[in-house]
Amino acid sequence: MLLEKAGVSHVETLCPKCGWRLNASACPTDDRRPEGGDFSLCGKCYVVLRFESDLRLKAVSEAELEALDEDILEDLQKVRTILISLARRDAGGERGSA
Ligand SMILES: [Zn+2]
């Protein structure tokens, strides 16, 4: 089903940075469900988040980010780019005249 492809439901958490309601995620590479320790990004402010073992999301600190493997950082950057382009597409035509 489309809904299942669009996202996997998890424990609802408010984004620690912007307060956006986060209750679903999608893995860009496969249909895997999120697990504790997985990284995610807020779909609104794009802050890097990490799933706790109970699948709540917590913000990743700058120090934690700096300690990550480059592969993971690259993947997060790719996902962020995708999210930003999707947000731009969705916002197209909604703006009034400047
Ligand atoms: Zn956010």
Image: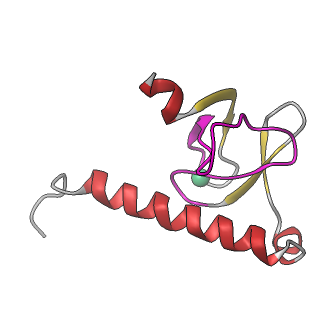
Q: Is residue 22 above or below residue 77?
A: above
From the image, give the main secondary structure of the stretch colored magenta: loop
Where residue 51 appears, x then y in whole percent? Answer: 80, 43
> Colour mode?
secondary structure
Q: Quadrant of the C terminus?
A: bottom left
Residue at horizontal 84 percent and vertical 78 percent from the top: 66
Q: Is residue 28 magenta?
A: yes
Residue 76 or residue 60, whichever sits in front: 76
Where residue 5 appears, x then y in whole percent? Answer: 51, 32
Residue at horizontal 86 percent and vertical 30 percent from the top: 54
* Residue at the front extreme, as displayed: 30
Where on the picture, by quarter, is residue 65?
A: bottom right
Q: Is residue 27 magenta?
A: yes
* Residue at the top extreme, as displayed: 1
Where residue 59 appears, x then y in whole percent? Answer: 77, 55
Residue 38 or residue 56, whichever sits in front: 38
Q: Is residue 6 left or right of residue 62?
A: left
Q: Is residue 50 above or below residue 8?
A: below
Residue at horizontal 18 percent and vertical 57 percent from the top: 95
Q: Is residue 28 left or right of residue 50?
A: left
Instruction: Specify start and end residues of the magenta stretch as a single range.
Output: 19-46
Q: Is residue 38 above or below residue 34?
A: below
Where on the picture, by quarter, is residue 11?
A: top right
Q: Is residue 61 above or below residue 34?
A: below
Number of numbered discs on residues: 0
